Image (cartoon, rainbow, N blue to C red):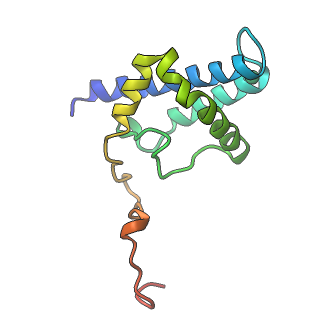
Amino acid sequence: MPAGRDTRRVARERRTITAMIAMYCRDHHQRRGLCEECAGLAAHADKRLDHCPYGTAKPTCVQCPIHCYAPPMRERAREVMRHAGPRMLLRHPVLAIAHLMDGERAVPPLPGRRVPPPLSDQKAPAGSER
Ligand SMILES: [Zn+2]
């Protein structure tokens, strides 16, 4: 996988989250620009993307097994996604479709850390692990 493509994906994820926050703010808070709260969330998301341990192999945030947002931000981000998610296809079709396609990719194993298997595959025989 050429690195250039992945870098573009991360850049696009940044645009996607920014567009979603902007949409949410416009519909709930103010007509122009981001209110202080949403600007804070956007900055937080931006910083989290900078420090994503997956780097360029990043899955979409919805799928990501790491919950990297600080709890209050996470709650807000969830609300933003819930509102903007279904509307993205109408207002930002290119970003939305690209994002949906990214969502088809398997979540890569996190470098240097074990990722727990999906719940459905988790058979933990009693006493086999402590
Ligand atoms: Zn706002």
Left or right of 103 on screen, residue 24? right
122 sits left or right of 80 in the view: left
Q: Which residue lies furthest to the left in this view?
A: 1
Which is more toward the observer, 109 or 16?
Answer: 16
Residue 51 falls left or right of residue 22: left
* Residue drawn at x 28%, y 24% as measured from the top left: 4
Name the image quarter holding residue 105: top left
Q: In this view, does 88 lie above or below 127?
A: above
Q: Residue 73's x, y, as percent?
A: 69, 39
Quadrant of picture, ligand 1: top right
In the image, taking residue 7 as reference, residue 83 lies left or right, namely right
Corner quadrant of residue 127 = bottom left
Nearest the viewer among 51 and 59 is 59
Q: Is residue 111 above or below residue 42?
A: below
**Rendering coords of residue 111 (x, y %):** 36, 52
Give percent across and percent down for residue 74. 66, 43
- Residue shown at the point (39%, 32%) measured from the top left: 100
Residue 70 position (above or below residue 44): below
**How far across and how far down the image is residue 36, in percent?**
78, 21
Looking at the image, the residue that sits furthest to the bottom is 127
- Quadrant for the N terminus in the image: top left
User: 72 or 2: which is nearer to us?
Assistant: 72
